[in-house]
Image (spheres, rainbow, N blue to C red):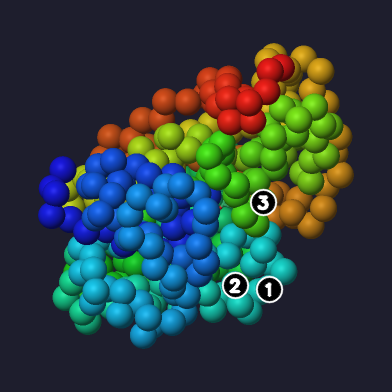
Amino acid sequence: MSGKETILVIGSCGQLGTELVESLQKIYGAAQVIAADIRRSNNPVFQNGPFEILDILDQKRLTEIVAKYKPTQVYHLAALLSATAEQKPEFGWKLNMDGLFNVLNLARDGGIIKKIYWPSSIAVFGPNTIRNNTPQYGAMDPTTIYGISKNAGELYAQYYFNRWGIDVRSLRYPGLIGYKSAPGGGTTDYAVQIYHDALEGKTHECFLSEQTTLPMLYMPDALKATLDIMHASAADIKIRTSYNLAGMSFNPNEISEAIKQIIPDFSITYNPDYRQAIADSWPAIIDDSRAREDWGWNPAYTLESMSKDMIDNLQALKGQAI
Ligand code: AKB
């Protein structure tokens, strides 16, 4: 990997950003990875390299940071996720869209940023989408502000590529599950909390119903997909909106059964709330064959192997024995 790249990670303190910064530091060197977020995190990963306070809606501050470090790549992760954006729809739209425009316009006008990563989501799909083996192309009628912003953002990414040659790459993430950092504001986040509850000996009260199947991805696979698409040759990126991406699909009952294989006393109850309607509008199983064909996507983890790894690692972190 080239040592000359400088990478700016916007929204670096979130669930994905924290782990991505750590991976990027290993590849490019800590000094080459500039972490930026609206507030500081005390995760030790941010002590290793430069950190800048950045509100992505502040175009002037973004321009200053880009002028200071001259990043060749930007990972723009700052966004309100599905559940939070439903609580603050106007701000959700503003943050998700204006934040993206600020990055795209600086890449177009500034001549410094050469490549952008911007995540999309399964939230771009809606009730009229085929739910099982959801194809790359088909009905996209998102019902949430988050999904509408991701759908529009995908089209803008493609527009900036077609019109100005801006090299934006994107993945439609399913629910992301990891043990190193907490998720924030997603409809799929129960699938992280459930492991914490299991390890703390608590009953998990699930905000989705027992049979709600959703696509999910374990964090090591999500990191691999993100880095693979960014490292692929531009000619192999044939989809300039965003790629369907999947690892596994399960419902709350199935994940609780997988946990019970390791922690037999674990229990779950169901109390669906407003997030149920969001989940019901999303696909259950994603067809990610275009990512596999175009740049070699191949996830490693299943529900069983992820559950074992999550529990082993959380247990080590919490320093407790089952
Ligand atoms: C959410 O639940 O909002 C996110 C997503 C699927 O994009 N995890």
Question: Where 36 falls versus 216 (above or below)?
Answer: below
x and y percentages locating residue 202 in the rendered image: 82, 31
Mark 2 and mark 3: Cα distance apart in space: 15 Å
The amino acid type of the residue labelled 2 equals Gly
x and y percentages locating residue 152 in the rendered image: 46, 70
The amino acid type of the residue labelled 1 equals Lys
Q: Mark 1 or mark 3, which is nearer the start of the sequence?
A: 1
Mark 1 Cβ and ligand 1 under 8 Å apart: no
Mark 3 and mark 1: Cα distance apart in space: 15 Å
Mark 3 burial class by Cα count in 10 Å: few <14, some 14-19, many 20+: many
To which quarter of the image does residue 144 belong? bottom right
Give the position of the C terminus as an image quadrant. top right
Residue 321 appearing in the image: yes
The amino acid type of the residue labelled 3 equals Thr
Mark 2 and mark 1: Cα distance apart in space: 6 Å
Closest to the observer, 2 or 152: 2
- Residue annotated with mark 3: 187
- Residue annotated with mark 2: 92
Q: Mark 3 or mark 2, which is nearer the start of the sequence?
A: 2
Mark 3 Cβ and ligand 1 under 8 Å apart: yes
Question: Where 24 falls versus 145 (above or below)?
Answer: above
Residue 244 appearing in the image: no
Closest to the observer, 18 or 114: 18
Q: How many marks?
A: 3
Instruction: Left or right? Give the position of 14 relative to 297.
Output: right
Residue at 61%, 69% in the rendered image: 145
- Residue annotated with mark 1: 88
Asked if labels 1 and 2 touch by Cβ distance under 8 angstroms, the answer is: yes
Question: Where 289 falls versus 315 (above or below)?
Answer: below
